[in-house]
Amino acid sequence: MGFTMGLNLLLLMAMVATNILSLYHLSSTLVSSKSPSPIHSPVPDHLLQQLRTIRATINHLTRHQPSSDTASTTGGKPSSSAVPQDLLLYSHLSSIASSCHNHPDLLHKYMSYTPFSICPHDPELQETLILNGCHPLPRRRCFSKTPSKPPSPIPLHPFPTSLPDSGVIWSKYACKSFACLSEKQPGFDLKKQRQTLVTFSSELDLPIPQFIQIAKSANSVIRLGIDIGGGTGTFAAVMKELYNMTVLTTTMNINAPYNEAVALRGLVPLHVPLQQRLPVFDGVLDLVRCGRAVNRWIPLVVMEFMLYDIDRVLRGGGYLWLDRFFSRRVDLEKVYGPMIGKLGYKKVKWAVANKTDSGGLKHEEVYLTALLQKPTSK
Ligand SMILES: *[C@@H]1O[C@H](CO)[C@@H](O)[C@H](O)[C@H]1NC(C)=O
Ligand SMILES: *[C@@H]1O[C@H](CO)[C@@H](O)[C@H](O)[C@H]1NC(C)=O
């Protein structure tokens, strides 16, 4: 008994001693490296401090993982945990990449690459990680694969007769050309999509020229905007073609090269998912438009974050335009309507109509097209 205790004590002392030694060694190398060494300059204190803060934050967040249903339910129920629910959710959804921890298998696959060579071509893996909140993506030290020759001819107009197929790496897509896509995916028929944006065929339509007229008569100048979930960028294309306006398009590459299509039209594609903070500063935009990508399938809490982020980027007097937002009729009345109402915007247009496709009839869904103006003072 006495012997084992003595041994344990000895071991403990040995451990402490080695630690003290290594500590001494480390600190002395830090001190000695103060002498100017061109290659291994010491890490500045403020950087170390930042790293420590980042590590502490990540540890904190990973110890408080939100339960898996937070993101998928219409929730927002306060949990018993002391950490505010908002913070938990934000850590799960926001761009600080903490959600990468939730998908170790995908992340491992994504991070298996040879540094300083060509990255594996895995666009679908990237989309999955981004959609799960793992953004910005962590891979840093490899070269992204690009098409083997520059796209040609590069269109100078947002409505070219055709987009150059050489601007896309097609290997991961079912279609191998834009001609194929324009038949299979509605957004790639540029002319047809243009038509739907400038014509009035039901009360759910707000043709772009009419919107411009409304803004003009309110003495509101529209020059800058963002189209959320804008697909191939046709809204931005019309705004540029007809009114010289700059509209950014957020778009994901789900099953088709949407980002490349937008860029090939000379427009700016922002590769960000719906749940991400918009990458622009507060109060700088005249217009935010949400197309059909914004609908009742977005978790309610995310929807709320999105509305407040939209409010953040809009200038006073700017417009929020919801184009065919769909939800159940009862949810529009009880949930979405009041949520939008909380922004305190002026309802310039508010049109609701039944969604008459089979899914819409089954779930008693409606479309809402709304044009809302942010008050000038808040
Ligand atoms: C757009 O800008 C071009 C070049 O500055 C100009 O020639 C054209 O008239 C403008 N179009 C509109 C609709 O303002
Ligand atoms: C819309 O659908 C509801 C049932 O969900 C029905 O009662 C109503 O009459 C419909 N309205 C129109 C204009 O068809």
Image (cartoon, grey):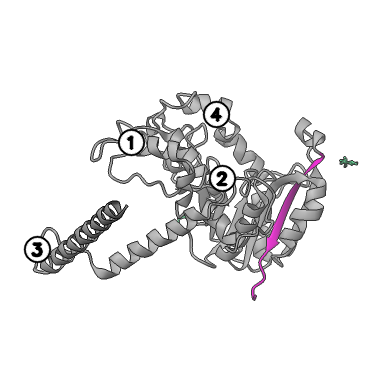
Residue holding disc 4: 182
Q: Nearer the viewer, mark 4 or mark 1?
A: 1
Measured in 3D between alpha carbons, the distance from the residue under mark 1 to the one under mark 2, in whole angstroms, is: 32 Å
The stretch of residues the image draws in magenta is: 364-378
- Say which of 168 and 115 sits in front: 115
For residue 180, above or below residue 199: above
Dot 1, crowdedness within 10 Å: few (<14), some or many (≥20)?
A: few
Measured in 3D between alpha carbons, the distance from the residue under mark 4 to the one under mark 1, in whole angstroms, is: 35 Å
Amino acid, disc 2 = Gly
Residue 236 image position (x, y, % from top left): 54, 48
- Say which of 7 and 336 sits in front: 7
Is residue 276 in view from this perspective?
no
Q: Quadrant of the C terminus?
A: bottom right
Residue 346 image position (x, y, % from top left): 73, 65
Q: Nearer the viewer, mark 1 or mark 2?
A: 1
- The label on residue 120 is none
For residue 334, above or below residue 142: below
Which residue appears at 38% of the width and 64% of the height?
A: 53
| Dot 1 or dot 3, earlier in sequence | 3
Measured in 3D between alpha carbons, the distance from the residue under mark 2 to the one under mark 3, in whole angstroms, is: 51 Å
- The label on residue 37 is 3
Residue holding disc 2: 230
Dot 3, crowdedness within 10 Å: few (<14), some or many (≥20)?
A: few
Q: Nearer the viewer, mark 2 or mark 3?
A: 3
Residue holding disc 1: 112
Q: Nearer the viewer, mark 2 or mark 4?
A: 2
| Dot 1 or dot 2, earlier in sequence | 1
